[in-house]
Image: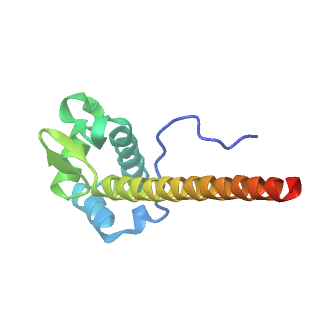
Amino acid sequence: MSHKHQDKQALVHLVNTYQKEKFQKFISNNNYNLYEAYGRFWIILELITASNNQLLPLDIVPNSLKKFVNNAIADELFYLENNCIYSKFIRRTLELRNAKREERAILISGLIQENKKLRDEVKRLQRIMKLRVKR
C-alpha cells in the first residue's frame, strides 16, 4: 500500500491539540463535546489549508460550523482578517515548510554548480592528458 500524498496540500497533525489549555478552555467555555469540537476544529484547519493564501472567507464556511467558528475566533483558536479566518499554526507551519524548501533549492543549486565545476575540471584534465599522450 502506497503512502504517497495524493493531494498537493498536506497538513501536519499535532498529536496533542486536545490537551492544550487554550483548546480545553474553549471546550469548557462553549460546552462542547471533546470529540465533536476536535473534529470540527480539524475540518476548519483543513478548509483553511486548502483555501487561497490560507485565508478562508467566512461566507463559505458551512452554516453548521459558523457558530463554532465564531466561538473559536472569540477564544483565539482562529483569527479574523478581512472577513476571512486564518490559523497562526498553519501560517507558521507553511512558513517553516517554505523555508525548508528554499534551503533545499539553494543546496541543490549549489551542488549543481559544484558538479558543473568538477565536470569542467575533469574535461580540462582530460585535454591535458591527451596533449601529453600525443607528445
With 62 as the anchor, is 101 left or right in this view?
Answer: right
Number of dots carrying numbers = 0
Q: Is residue 123 above or below residue 56?
A: below
Q: Residue at x 63, y 56 (%)?
A: 115
Residue 109, x across and y down, in percent: 52, 53
- Tell me the quarter of the picture where residue 24 sits: bottom left
With 50 as the anchor, is 7 left or right in this view?
Answer: right
In terms of depth relative to the viewer, which is nearer, 32 or 66?
66
In terms of depth relative to the viewer, which is nearer, 3 or 114?
114
- Tell me the quarter of the picture where residue 76 sits: bottom left
With 77 as the anchor, is 17 left or right in this view?
Answer: right
Q: Is residue 90 above or below residue 50?
A: below
Quarter of the image containing the N terminus? top right
Residue lying at the far front in this picture: please name it: 135
With 133 as the anchor, is 25 left or right in this view?
Answer: left
Q: Residue at x 33, y 41 (%)?
A: 48
Q: Residue at x 32, y 62 (%)?
A: 23
Residue 90, x across and y down, in percent: 35, 53
Residue lying at the far bottom in this picture: please name it: 21
